[in-house]
Image (tube, rainbow, N blue to C red):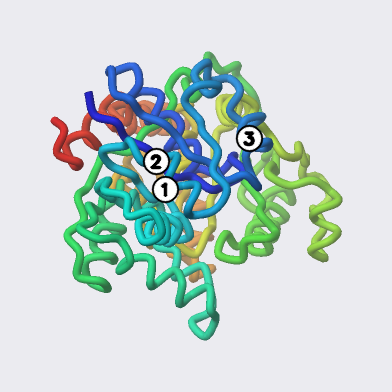
Amino acid sequence: MPKIAFVLPVRGGSGGAHSVMQEVSALRDLGVDATVLVNQQNIDSFMQTYDRYGWVSTGVSVFNGPRDLGRVAASADVVVATTNTSAHSIAEAISETKASFRTAYYVQDYEPLFYDASTIDHSIAVASFSVLPNCTYFAKTHWLCDIVQATHGHNVQRVVPSIDHTIYRPARRDAREKRVLCAMVRPDTPRRAPRKTIALMERVVSGTYGPADVFAFGVDEEDLAKAGMQMPEGVQLVGKLKQTEVAALLRNADFFVDLSDYQAFGRTAAESMACGCIALAPKLGGASDFIEDGVNAFLADCTDPKSIDSALRRMFSMSDAEASAMRYAGMEAVSAYTPVRAAISELKALGFA
């Protein structure tokens, strides 16, 4: 039985962390000794976020610095980085403790894009692709595999993405006169285009595309105020939601809109499709792996206002029959993204299956 440790130095709550947790849970169900290693700074928040997993008390361990990480992970067959900082921590742990475990890097996003090219953070993110010895790289979209191979020369194996279908699932919808649109707003993440998203919601709620109710989530009034932003009148701000609450919102919505500059995967778009909600996602990135534009969802060049406007007009112009057909196609497109399939694909990438 292989022993695999995923190093995840985060507070929890992000799409990447959700992915790791649900896939580790599936690995454990398959009989694999899979664990998650979280740094001391984030452990309390992490444990609170993922207390719904019954295995966290025994399957999550804490480390305090690289030397301690080397100690905690010493018995693992392979230690997997999940962020650029965790790749460096693993490399330092090997250097300081002479640990003999294999290394892998689960590339969740291309993190050099997070930072200005002149910053130290950018240099650290770039260097994360060269610090791990004999590393196995894997990622969940063609776009991520291609960008790492083209930029760093690594062969990156593509694994299956996962959606927690126990949470993200369709539900019966009542007939209504207005379409319902929702969007996530993240003021502290410029690449997620918060101002552009707010401007779009203002147009939608004003009736530009037809009668609509509009909901915003992922942020509260205080965070908006700190960022110098304001939600347009008529948009219903529902705040920061847990996974189950996001799923309930998506099940009740007709449309979910993501205007990010790019998405390495497009998790919330995929989850919305699993809920029977029609998604609009950025053309740049990994969403094209599961979205066929105009068939099971919509893609737009989110750097081009005309492309966004055209996609919105197409969405709102659909008849009920056309919308139903697209919902079914969307649910079908992501139905195979199960944690078990994702876990098995990771075992294959690591040479254990």
Q: Quadrant of residue 89?
A: bottom left
Left or right of 192 on screen, residue 85: left
Quickly name the residue at label 1: 70
| Mark 3 vs 1: CB contact within 8 A | no
Locate residue 126, reporting x and y percent. 39, 72
Left or right of 190 on screen, residue 136: left
Q: Is residue 85 above or below residue 118?
A: above
Quickly name the residue at label 2: 73
Q: Is residue 100 above or below residue 18?
A: below
Q: CA distance from mark 3 to mark 2?
A: 47 Å
Q: Amino acid at mark 2?
A: Ala
Q: What secondary structure is marked by label 3? A: strand
Q: Amino acid at mark 1?
A: Gly
Q: CA distance from mark 1 to mark 2?
A: 5 Å
Q: Is residue 349 above or below residue 81?
A: above
Which quadrant: the N terminus?
top left
| View extreme (front): residue | 97
Locate residue 344, reporting x and y percent. 22, 29
- Residue ID at (48%, 75%): 122
Residue 137 appearing in the image: yes
Quickly name the residue at label 3: 180
